[in-house]
Amino acid sequence: MTANPTSNDADLTAAPVPVRPAATVMIIRDAQHGEPGIEVFMLRRTLNAVFGSGMYVYPGGRVEATDGDDIDRAFRLAAIRECFEEAGVLLAHTPGTFETITDGHPALAARVGVHDGSIDLLTLCQQHDLQPAIEQLVWVAHWITPKGESSRRFDTRFYLVPAPPGQTSTHDDNETIASLWTRPADALQRQADGELTMMPPTITTLQMLLPFTSVAQAMTTSRTWPMPRCVLPKLRLDAEGKLIGIAMPDDADYDTLD
């Protein structure tokens, strides 16, 4: 989804684009300086990306067939895999504990292999006697890309997870070209000032994090939330079929749009 639609967007009358399942993960940590609060890890997508080029996003990507047939588990495994590929953070722990691994663990050396597909995430975990930290992820948002907006559409689940203590996070310098830890309020202000470009789901989920003053509070509270409502924005088009805006489900004209 584009954050700032313009009148020269691609043709919106093309054949329908299939919706692909995807997962993204909001890694949070307690604020490192200043007042109490939390920080979230964000990446800037490469300028050559087909979808969301140059946008600031969270680590994420498509659900693959290798993630299995259990839908909930598959989305969570995809989030963990993409987090490892794009942020270098492996959300995994030894069986029977909830202690995630730290820098220097041999499994972390497989980041490139997992990214290029030569190493399977579950196989990697088995080789190092690890379990994906599926239970640590909290599903907090659910968005579907609007019809007709892009050559790619995604049915995306957003997960919240604490940053593993002792693991360094950094962009991959491939699909992503920059990264930062930021307070949600600061990221939103920079977006409003035109410094960071974001898609509507990113802006909305950052707003969701604003009330929290600690990771513990964020995780405890989010676990009490009901299953996320699926949000499907719609495109506002002018008389010539050009994109002029995005309508959200609560907007007055939402039900009048295709």
Image (spheres, helix red, strand yellow):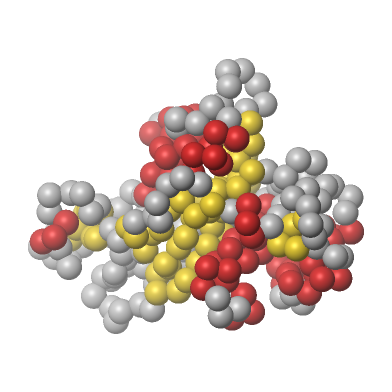
Determine the residue positioned at 69% across, 57% down.
Answer: 133
* Image quadrant occupied by the N terminus: bottom left
Query: Looking at the picture, how far across and down is residue 68, in whole percent?
Result: 60, 78
Above or below — where is 213 with respect to 44? above
Above or below — where is 65 with respect to 192? below
Query: Looking at the picture, how far across and down is residue 147, in whole percent?
Result: 29, 69
Residue 210 falls in image quadrant: top left
Q: How many marks?
A: 0
Determine the residue positioned at 68% across, 52% down.
Answer: 87
For the view shown, which residue lies furthest in the top direction? 34
Choose between 117 and 221: the one closer to the eye. Answer: 221
Residue 49 visible in the snapshot: no
- Report the side of 115 relative to 255 (left or right): right
Residue 167 visible in the snapshot: yes
Determine the residue positioned at 52% across, 62% down.
Answer: 23
Above or below — where is 73 with respect to 1? below
Query: Looking at the picture, how far across and down is residue 187, in whole percent?
Result: 49, 35
Above or below — where is 102 with respect to 192? below
Choose between 242 and 198: the one closer to the eye. Answer: 198
- Report the side of 179 relative to 131 (left or right): left
Choose between 82 and 116: the one closer to the eye. Answer: 82
Query: Looking at the picture, how far across and down is residue 226, in whole percent?
Result: 40, 51
Determine the residue positioned at 64% across, 36% down.
Answer: 29
Residue 167 falls in image quadrant: top right
